[in-house]
Image (spheres, grey):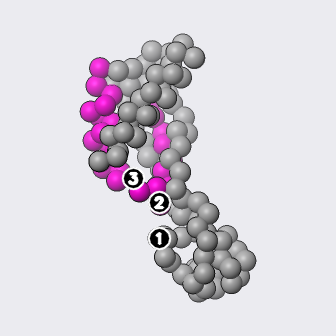
């Protein structure tokens, strides 16, 4: 389950930010996760609760916003939102699409004390 490793990296980033910005408690973490990032959201929530025990983020609310996938269509030359990697272009129905987004996982902000 790579979600545990993601949570450990997330905690490290919060701890580094805490040292750099002089905060000792994280109340809320807001993440954006791309639809194609390969992250199981419920496993990430579970892992976050486990990994943050005893840390500055213990009990923090984890807010996750899923970001749609994006791709560039060779047929109509448009960048479009995609529900899955093999989807046809929603604008023209074309089948030749180059994925161009939706694989990221980003910390948008932290609510801290």
Asked which secondary structure carries label 2, the reply is: loop
Q: Can residue 59 be seen in this view?
A: no
In the picture, the disc for residue 84 is 1
Q: Mark 3 points at which residue?
A: 39
What residue do we see at 34% from left, 53% from top? 40
- Is the C-beta separation of discs 3 and 2 under 8 Å? no
Query: Is residue 51 rendered to the left or right of residue 80?
Result: left
Q: Where does the magenta region start and end?
A: 28-54
Give the quarter of the image for residue 52: top left
**Label 3 to label 2: alpha-carbon separation:** 8 Å
Looking at the image, is 63 positioned above or below residue 67?
Answer: above
Membership of 6 in magenta stretch: no
Asked which secondary structure carries label 1, the reply is: loop
Choose between 61 and 16: the one closer to the eye.
Answer: 16
**Label 2 to label 1: alpha-carbon separation:** 8 Å
Percent x, y for residue 43? 29, 48
Percent x, y for residue 94? 61, 85
**Label 1 to label 3: alpha-carbon separation:** 14 Å
Mark 2, residues whose alpha carbon is within 10 Å: few (<14), some, or many (≥20)? many
Mark 1, residues whose alpha carbon is within 10 Å: few (<14), some, or many (≥20)? some
Choose between 29 and 33: the one closer to the eye.
Answer: 33
What residue do we see at 29% from left, 48% from top? 1
Looking at the image, is 66 positioned above or below residue 12?
Answer: below
Q: Is residue 12 visible?
A: yes
Query: Is residue 104 rendered to the left or right of residue 4?
Result: right
Give the quarter of the image for residue 92: bottom right
Mark 2 or 1, nearer chain start:
2
Percent x, y for residue 30? 48, 39
In the picture, the disc for residue 35 is 2
What residue do we see at 57% from left, 84% from top? 95
Asked which secondary structure carries label 3, the reply is: loop
Number of numbered markers: 3
């Amino acid at each position: 389950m790579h979600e545990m490793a993601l949570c450990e990296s997330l905690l490290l980033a919060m701890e580094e930010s805490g040292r750099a910005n002089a905060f000792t408690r994280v109340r809320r973490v807001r993440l954006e996760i791309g639809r194609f990032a390969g992250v199981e959201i419920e496993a990430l929530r579970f892992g976050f609760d486990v990994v943050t025990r005893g840390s500055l983020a213990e009990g923090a609310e984890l807010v996750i916003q899923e970001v749609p996938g994006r791709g560039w269509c060779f047929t109509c030359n448009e960048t479009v939102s995609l529900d899955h990697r093999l989807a046809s272009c929603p604008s023209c129905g074309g089948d030749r699409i180059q994925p161009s987004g939706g694989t990221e996982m980003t910390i948008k902000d932290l609510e801290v004390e």
